Image (spheres, rainbow, N blue to C red):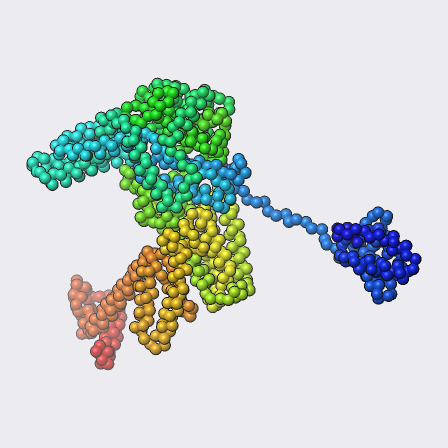
Amino acid sequence: MAGSSGEQAPDYRSILSISDGAARAQALNEHLSTRSYVRGYSLSQADVDAFRQLSAPPADPQLFHVARWFRHIEALLGSPCGKGQPCVFQASKGRRVQPQWSPPAGTQPYRLHLYNSLTRNKEVFIPQDGKKVTWYCCGPTVYDASHMGHARSYISFDILRRVLRDYFRFDVFYCMNITDIDDKIIKRARQNHLFRQYREKRPEAAQLLEDVQAALMPFLVKLNETTDADKKQMLERIRHAVQLATEPLEKAVQSRLTGEEVTSRVEVLLEEAKDLLSDWLDSTLGSDVTDNSIFSELPKFWEGEFHRDMEALNVLPPDVLTRVSEYVPEIVNFVQKIVDNGYGYVSNGSVYFDTVKFASSEKHSYGKLVPEAVGDQKALQEGEGDLSISADRLSEKRSPNDFALWKASKPGEPSWPCPWGKGRPGWHIECSAMAGTLLGASMDIHGGGFDLRFPHHDNELAQSEAYFENDCWVRYFLHTGHLTIAGCKMSKSLKNFVTIKDALKKHSARQLRLAFLMHSWRDTLDYSSNTMESALQYEKFLNEFFLNVKDILRAPVDVAGQFEKWGEEEAELNKNFYDKKTEIHKALCDNVDTRTVMEEMRALVSQCNLYMAARKAVRGRPSRALLENIALYLTHMLKIFGAIEEESSLGFPVGGPGTSLNLESTVMPYLQVLSEFREGVRKIAREQKVPEVLQLSDALRDDILPELGVRFEDHEGLPTVVKLVDRNTLLKEREEKRRVEEEKRKKKEEAARRRQEQEAAKLAKMKIPPSEMFLSETDKYSKFDENGLPTHDMEGKELSKGQAKKLKKLFEAQEKLHKEYLQMAQNGSFQ
């Protein structure tokens, strides 16, 4: 047959022209033996015409092919086909045909939404160039140790970056800057330099006391003028510390002491008065510091410390890092073009941005992020820097809202040549110039801390859009939330300033990251003992699950045996697994909501734990493949979040960096053999009733193996579970177990002591004959009858019948107790 088979319609003319019917049938049979027999192909008119020549299938069995095709065509044709029309199946003949296929309706795919500070709403994330994402992140100003506020921002952005790159599969180009030219850096560098010089001169005690007194005068003025409560508290503490360190040295000078006693007191005062003297030295000698290298040493050192802190936190390095000091020529050109475009002006060697001119332009708007903050002079002056808010500098501006693009350098400040005289970059311009140079006129994402929105980021936007003459320098602005310390703002004055190094001494990088993952990246995060305890418990919860799954996977089983028939429990758990994956995907699409993700992961693990417990209760084997799939998925998600640092195939890595896989795969077989040997020994010891061996076995489990990071878990009637766990974790568990056992022991002893006291008190009471029980109560009764029962109260009044009846009952009860005592004594119960 012709049609989709690709066969050509046969030339039946030569066959039909054969006059002899038998010969014609034989020729047709030979031809049809070469034709494929495939249902559903269209029939050509030639096929139909050829078989219309036959009234019935031939009876000759040798003409098999003719008979077969005759019946086939007869079944297919509902009516003769018109000339040139293909013949197809007819349903009326009872032959089944394929029904029409329809594609499934499907569901609407979830799309990633990000909270955009430019709109203060969650917006669908659409990169400008396919899957490529250009991202600029404001880096640190490196003049001191990195603290938990930095960690809040950079861990959060690291999580977001990893999720966009490794989960949503965007091609992320991540750029970050280092601010190594800044008012804070200049001032700190000068102070450190001048104080170091002062200390190297080894001032005499009298000279040091005189200089401290001189430094105190401007310091006290500053203290009195400070209105910020936290800063005032910090300054008060400095003053008090200096006073305490000054008094012993003054006494030593008055007493004309010499040698080590004076030297040690000088060193104490130098240390306590360092900030005080540094400020004073800078105010008097700062303008004499002219060597630019002095201003580069400080940021270079702290930049190195910052990178080491980020590496310790498992924060990915940027794809490209920019330093302000390396981009000064680009910054100068950037400023010049802003001036050329009419949005900047030169004033006394400095260049300022004209906010009024920019805001009045139809194609621009100033204060996109925080319009309500425009005009906030306190915030604007903080953005300009401590060295740039003098009265003469402020008077150079056309409007109080204008800000410096380029600052004319004063004596004691680093400087670079430019068309307007020697100077240095303003704070805001550095990010615009560096990001603009690398990312162009429009980037997809700009990130920074919440406190940078105004004036820093609003000014960045303004000057960049003034340079590029556009209104879309940043498409999505992301701002991480604040960090508080136990509910308070982090401040040196409150003594709650926590450096990253200090935090890592208490908790691991993974634990810190888990704490961040358990909170929204854009909300305030409270770094407290409660927050970290939640993270520790979450880590332990997940780790126990991973260890239990590893133990199940280590159980010997043949290749086919690992695939067992699923029951209702497995089907239900698998359904929950896929439901949770859907919920996790929805949460990540919803502004990368890791808090919900962590809750869904916890719920999934809880369901797995219930499933494993149910299988264990009936001595059944859980589904290895199902639990492994779930554990691998959770491991994959934790790797995406950066919570698993090493290359671990399943669960958290064991051991130090680079040793996780080798340690587990190498050590576990030996531990398994030890566990089996120990179990055999315990069995024999129980049968032979050898408690000493059982005690040694328990000591191995409880005392020796935890020191090596190994946990043996004994379960009645089941093999011992072997787990590799962090040594410190095991030691803490052991100490906690001992503490709980000690509390139980003390409570037990206390209960036993109370029982003994009660029994002793009861026995003492039983010893008393009923005739004597009231005689000692002379403060209540004055007369007694012959049996010792009171008859009159202490005032000589006869007792009422009610009182006498009550005392009679007590008497009879005591009589019963005393008889019981006498009986016990007779039986020798007290021996």
- For residue 508, above or below residue 424: below
Identify the image quadrant of the C terminus. Answer: bottom left
Residue 78 placement (x, y as % from top left):
83, 54
Farthest left residue in view: 255
Q: Image quarter for residue 210?
A: top left
Q: Is residue 326 visible?
A: yes
Q: Which residue occupies the foreground of this view, 87 or 152?
A: 87
Question: In the image shown, does 173 or 626 lie closer to the viewer?
Answer: 173
Q: Is residue 63 above or below residue 355?
A: below
Can residue 69 be seen at all in this image of the molecule?
no
Q: Nearer the viewer, residue 359 or 48?
A: 48
User: How many callouts does the rendering have?
Assistant: 0
Q: Residue furthest right?
A: 19
Q: Is 352 located above or below residue 659 in the figure?
A: above
Which quadrant of the view contains residue 33? bottom right
Residue 130 in the image: state x and y as whole percent.
Answer: 54, 38
Residue at the image position 26 percent from the left and 75 percent from the top? 816
What residue is shown at x 34% (from left), y 22% (from top)?
A: 422
Residue 57 position by quadrant? bottom right
Rendered location of residue 139, percent (x, y): 39, 36
Question: Is 453 situated above or below 392?
Answer: below
Location of residue 448 in the rendering, given as x and y in whole percent from the top left corner: 41, 36
Which residue corresponds to the image point at 51% horizontal and 51% vertical from the top-left?
581
Q: Relative to residue 658, is residue 253 drawn left or right?
A: left
Q: Quadrant of the N terminus?
A: bottom right
Q: Nearer the viewer, residue 697 or 540?
A: 697
**Residue at (40, 62) in percent of width and height:** 668
